[in-house]
């Protein structure tokens, strides 16, 4: 209900870890996520109109500390907590059609926002291969302007944004 109509998408990134001891490390990571939109809620709101919706893009820049414990010589358990920034780009949106015999287009351009973000992750390291799950969350505030039909309207909205990654 608060997902901004985003569909499951694609995410990729990189992590850097620096071990302070066998049990404590510092990590920094950068992830990019792309999520297309479910256009059906927009089409339902504007029946008979042409609707075009872009994609959400998010960049997660996080750093934090982690703990690692040895289960066996080849298997280690790890967990990390990280904070940083979420840089998001909202989707472009347009709806067009006839209103009272006149063709009208309403559009909203993409907006970029930066907000505080945090993440938790954990998993197993087996013979230098990582298997884990990461949860990231943030709430950037977007400034948007919709134009069309001779008018313009601006506003700000806060978008809850979450990312769940399962990786190997």
Image: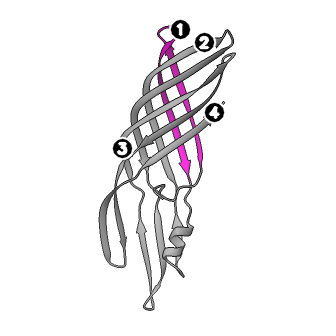
Q: Assign a secondary structure to mark 4.
A: strand
In percent of the image, x 57 and y 68: which residue is there? 40
> Between tags 2 and 1, which lies in front?
2
Residue 19 appears at what percent x and percent y?
50, 12
In percent of the image, x 42 and y 50: which residue is there? 160
For label 1, the crowd category at 10 Å Cα-Cα, with few meaning under 14, some 14 to 19 and many 20 or more, is: few
- Of the two numbered discs 1 and 4 on the same chain, state the one appearing first in sequence: 1
In reply to whether residue 36 is colored magenta, the answer given is no
Q: CA distance from mark 2 to mark 1?
A: 9 Å
Residue 68 appears at what percent x and percent y?
54, 16
Question: Relative to residue 67, is residue 165 drawn left or right?
Answer: right
Q: Assign a secondary structure to mark 2.
A: strand
Question: Relative to residue 158, is residue 74 drawn left or right?
Answer: right
Q: Please give the residue where the numbered disc 3 appears in the rendered image.
A: 114
For label 4, the crowd category at 10 Å Cα-Cα, with few meaning under 14, some 14 to 19 and many 20 or more, is: few
Q: Please give the residue where the numbered disc 1 appears in the rendered image.
A: 22
Q: CA distance from mark 2 to mark 4?
A: 20 Å
> Between tags 3 and 2, which lies in front?
2
Q: Please give the residue where the numbered disc 4 appears in the rendered image.
A: 167
Is mark 1 in CB contact (under 8 Å) with mark 4?
no
Q: Assign a secondary structure to mark 3.
A: strand
> Between tags 3 and 1, which lies in front?
1
Q: Please give the residue where the numbered disc 2 appears in the rendered image.
A: 70
- Of the two numbered discs 3 and 2 on the same chain, state the one appearing first in sequence: 2
In percent of the image, x 36 and y 79: which residue is there? 149
Q: CA distance from mark 3 to mark 1?
A: 35 Å
Q: CA distance from mark 1 to mark 4?
A: 23 Å
Point out the stretch of residues depicted in magenta. 9-35
């Amino acid at each position: 209900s608060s997902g901004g109509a985003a569909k499951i998408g694609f995410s990729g990134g990189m992590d850097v870890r620096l071990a302070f001891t066998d049990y404590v490390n510092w990590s920094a990571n950068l992830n990019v996520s792309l999520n297309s939109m479910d256009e059906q809620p927009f089409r339902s709101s504007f029946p008979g109109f042409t609707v075009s919706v872009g994609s959400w893009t998010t960049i997660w820049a996080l750093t934090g500390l982690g703990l690692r414990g040895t289960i066996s010589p080849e298997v280690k358990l790890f967990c990390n907590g990280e904070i940083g920034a979420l840089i998001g780009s909202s989707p472009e949106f347009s709806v067009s059609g006839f209103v009272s015999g006149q063709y009208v287009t309403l559009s909203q351009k993409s907006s970029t926002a930066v907000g505080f973000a945090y993440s938790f992750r954990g998993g197993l390291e087996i013979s230098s291969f990582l298997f884990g799950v990461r949860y990231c969350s943030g709430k950037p505030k977007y400034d948007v302007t919709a134009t069309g039909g001779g008018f313009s309207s601006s506003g700000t909205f806060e978008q809850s944004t979450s990312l769940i990654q399962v990786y190997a």
